[in-house]
Amino acid sequence: MTPYAPPDPAVLHPMPGQPRVVLLRPLVTSPLIEVGEYSYYDDPDDPTAFETRNVLYHYGPEKLVIGRFCALGTGVRFIMNGANHRMDGPSTFPLPTMGGSWSEHFDLLTGLSNRGDTVIGNDVWFGYGATVMPGVRIGHGAIIGARAVVTSDVPDYGIVGGNPARLIRTRYNEQDIARLLAVAWWDWPAEHITEHVRTIMSGSVDDLEAVAPDTRHR
């Protein structure tokens, strides 16, 4: 019997000869960024700079959480809550950050609006140049169109595009989405995923349910 050998999720560059692709889990070092296994970023310039070039204004304490098996196209960016400015006075300029005596008024920058963690589900595909705004939650199996600006939550298996991003359609009907969420193939053991790659990528919902491992052992 042929053994099923899954790829190593700890390898930084999973594709031989393609240094533009990195797995994010072994790359990130910030305790404020959590990434599931096999999620990757593709950039012809320097994908290893993801934490500084693609996660912006991340001064904490909110987290960026990215699930497993997410595909991030070149230039995908996450805007974090540190980008917020006061809007209740005549000027939005953060004067205290410039130093000097202005810094004595740093209390003016506390208590700014914070939408909390940005949470990305599993198996999400981000198109080229998509931008995700602070505190957004994106459901499992969603597709984010190229250059979309995501300002609000995206449902499971939703397809969104535009600026601001709008729901174009869902990939499956409500009943099938519930079935897919129950199967949750991204949580299967790596060996079982390896055995059923073709079903996961091209099978029907019925096919996927038929090969799901016994939930009593998950």
Image (cartoon, rainbow, N blue to C red):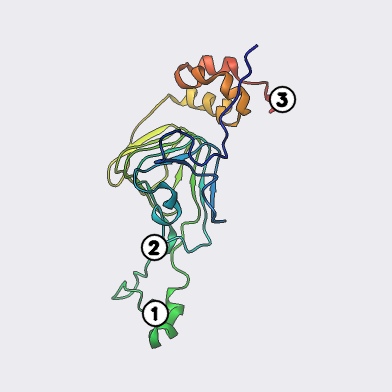
x, y percent for residue 179: 54, 24
Q: Could you tell whether 97 is left or right of 200 in the image?
A: left
- Residue type indicated by callout 1: Pro
Label 2 vs 1, first from the N-terminus: 2
Which of the 4 image quadrants contains residue 191? top right
Q: Is residue 54 above or below residue 114?
A: above
The residue positioned 37% from the left and 70% from the top of the image is 86
x, y percent for residue 45: 34, 47
Q: Which residue matches tag 3?
A: 216
Quarter that holds the C terminus: top right
Q: Residue furthest bottom?
A: 101
Disc count in the image?
3
Residues packed near mark 2 inside 10 Å, few (<14), some (14 to 19) or many (20 plus): some
Indicate which disc residue 96 carries: 1
Q: Could you tell whether 200 is left or right of 128 in the image?
A: right
x, y percent for residue 171: 40, 27
x, y percent for residue 69: 50, 34
Label 3 vs 1, first from the N-terminus: 1
Residues packed near mark 1 inside 10 Å, few (<14), some (14 to 19) or many (20 plus): some
Q: Are marks 2 and 3 in contact (CB under 8 Å)?
A: no
Q: Which residue matches tag 2?
A: 83
The residue positioned 63% from the left and 28% from the top of the image is 189
Q: CA distance from mark 2 to mark 3?
A: 45 Å
Q: CA distance from mark 2 to mark 1?
A: 15 Å
- Residue type indicated by callout 3: Arg
- Residue type indicated by callout 2: Ala
